């Protein structure tokens, strides 16, 4: 029985780090998508850095918003485990 509980503990530890990693991934992916969309639209409309900058800023805002949602979900999950 003790070995089974130890495995569950290790799995819970990994899932905790995966959740934290997903939070950072959402921040970075929002920024990368924003830059890519802005760069593509700049090439299409020949408006060189303007749309890249605009979509970079939108990507940062979106990334932080997604990160905020993930943190709230993670904290509420941790608080429900403690109760």
Image (spheres, rainbow, N blue to C red):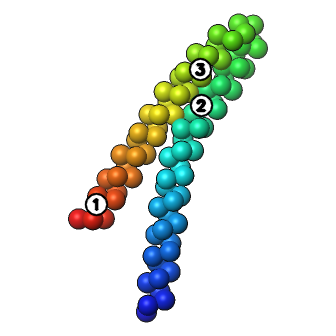
Helix, strand or loop at label 1? It is: helix
**Disc marking residue 80:** 1
Q: Nearer the viewer, residue 40 or 7?
A: 7
Counting from the top left corner in percent of width and height, residue 24 is at 54, 44
State the separation of the CA atoms marked 2 and 1.
31 Å
- Looking at marks 2 and 1 on the same chain, the residue that comes earlier in the sequence is marked by 2
* Mark drawn on residue 31: 2
- Of labels 1 and 3, earlier in sequence is 3
* Relative horizontal placement of residue 29, taking residue 71 as reference (left or right): right
Judged from this view, the residue extending furthest toward the bottom is 1
Contact, mark 2 vs mark 3 (Cβ under 8 Å): no
Classify the position of the C terminus by image quarter: bottom left
Q: CA distance from mark 2 to mark 3?
A: 8 Å
**Disc 3 on helix, strand or loop?**
helix
For the residues marked 1 and 3, what is the alpha-carbon distance in whole angstroms? 37 Å
Which residue corresponds to the image point at 34% horizontal and 57% vertical from the top-left?
A: 77
State the residue at coordinates (47%, 61%): 16
Residue with the mark numbered 3? 55
Question: Which numbered marker is on residue 2?
Answer: none
Q: Is residue 65 above or below residue 13?
A: above
Neighbours of disc 2 within 10 Å: few (<14), some (14-19), many (20+)? many
Tell whether label 3 touches label 1 (CB within 8 Å).
no
Image-based side of 81 in relation to 26, left or right: left
Identify the residue at horizontal 28%, vertical 60% (top origin): 80
Look at the picture and state if 11 lies above or below 74.
Answer: below
Mark 1 residue crowding within 10 angstroms, few (<14) / some (14–19) / many (20+): few
* Disc 2, SS: helix
Binning the other alpha carbons within 10 Å of mark 3 as few (below 14), some (14 to 19) or many (20 upward) gives: many
Q: Quadrant of the N terminus?
A: bottom left
């Amino acid at each position: 029985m003790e070995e089974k509980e130890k495995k569950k503990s290790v799995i819970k530890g990994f899932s905790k780090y995966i959740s934290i990693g997903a939070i950072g991934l959402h921040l970075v992916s929002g920024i990368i998508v924003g830059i890519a969309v802005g760069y593509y639209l700049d090439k299409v409309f020949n408006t060189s850095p303007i749309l890249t900058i605009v979509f970079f800023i939108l990507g940062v805002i979106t990334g932080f918003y997604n990160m905020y949602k993930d943190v709230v979900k993670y904290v509420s999950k941790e608080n429900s485990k403690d109760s």
